Image: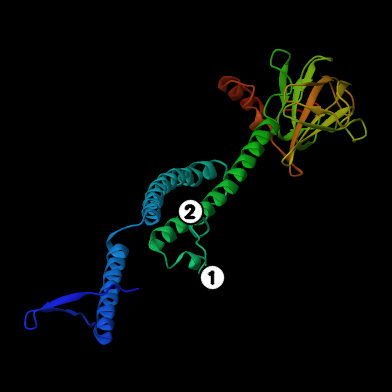
Amino acid sequence: MAKIKYYYDPETLSYRKIERKKRKTFSYIMLFLTAAGLFGLLFYILSFHYIDSPKAKALKRENENLKLNFEILNKRIVEVEDVLANVQERDENLYRIHFEAASIPDEQRLAGFGGVNRYRPLEGYENSELIINTTKEIDKLSKQLVVQSKSLDEIIQLAENKEKLLASIPAIQPVSNEDLTRMASGFGFRSDPFTKRRKMHYGMDFTAPRGTPIYATGDGTVVRADSRSSGYGKHIRIDHGFGYTSLYAHLYRYKVRVGQKVKRGDLIGLVGSTGRSQAPHLHYEVHKDGDKINPIHFYYGSLSAKEFAAILEQSKLENQSLD
């Protein structure tokens, strides 16, 4: 029950009951509610714009931390790009030139990503520009790394092939100088020992005693060790790969068999005088892609400059061959 209030009336010298009008009461109530609403709205606006909640503060700190991480990541990307650029430069100006490989065009190395906007989902955020630029750089760097990785795989394969090629080329003299009596005949036109006519001699003749060791001049596989080729007698043929084949004729005895893998310097046979031969010697030939070429150009692996000059002069003499 509401409490009754009185006031003193000096005219009547008595206390009178206070009568509260309903309209006035309603006005007070509305005024109070309006003031409270305005105060609440003002507090909300101030707190939203100027006062951060604990959750908002945590999100703000997280956002700043992410922004800092992206900036650090961008610096690292620049460092990686510098390293990659150095590798690409060496790849183009050192490795590929050394191994005679075709250059990789810049359009292929630096190609971007065309077509639809792949970065649309990253748009519309406070730091969208930073995130999109970083993502683009990472995508570009990833693609360049893939191209460079494939290039280095190719260079490794070329290096392995180069190593195999250098080991396979017939690069030493098949008879050592200690066992050699003389270099009887070289590559070119020579007098046939049987017909005395001038004809092409497609190899080099090394005079040595019967049983003198004969060595493989390069790595390869023995493809023939027989006497079924006219004039050569007992002979050996080694396939070195890369189009190279070497032939060793007039042998006394074999030291290898067909299908056997040999290394440069391995003993493969002994000097003899079988087939169309006038005296014990080794007839030696080098073939490249089926063509017979002068073996004198391949002795860089076993002779000194002085020895090579001497044998070169002897090979030029148009004397009589021994086969």
The amino acid type of the residue labelled 1 equals Gly
Q: Quadrant of the N terminus?
A: bottom left
Helix, strand or loop at disc 2? helix
Residue hosting label 1: 115
Q: How is the image coloured?
A: rainbow
Residues 47 and 290: in front is: 47
Q: Picture quarter containing residue 48?
A: bottom left
Which residue in the rendered view is the most extreme toward the front?
Answer: 13
| Distance Cα–Cα, label 2 vs label 1 | 18 Å
The amino acid type of the residue labelled 2 equals Ile
Tell me if 294 is positioned left or right of 238 in this view.
left
Q: Position of residue 253 (x, y in %)?
A: 88, 20
Residues 37 and 2: in front is: 2
Q: Quadrant of the C terminus?
A: top right
Residue 14: which numbered mark, if any?
Answer: none
Q: Position of residue 118 (x, y in %)?
A: 52, 66
Tell me if 207 is positioned left or right of 26 in this view.
right
Q: Picture quarter containing residue 243?
A: top right
Task: Identify the residue at horizontal 73%, vertical 22% (top origin).
Answer: 265
Task: Identify the residue at horizontal 49%, vertical 41% (top origin).
Answer: 94
Q: Position of residue 240 (x, y in %)?
A: 75, 35
Residue hosting label 2: 138
Query: Would residue 323 be visible to someone looking at this image?
Result: no
Task: Give yes or no for contact between labels 2 and 1 (Cβ–Cβ under 8 Å).
Answer: no
Residue 35, placed above or below residue 250: below
Task: Identify the residue at horizontal 77%, vertical 29% (top origin).
Answer: 284
Helix, strand or loop at disc 1? loop
Q: Position of residue 267 (x, y in %)?
A: 79, 20
Q: Give the mark nearest the N terminus, 2 or 1.
A: 1
Query: Would residue 197 be visible to someone looking at this image?
Result: yes
Residue 133, placed above or below residue 152: below
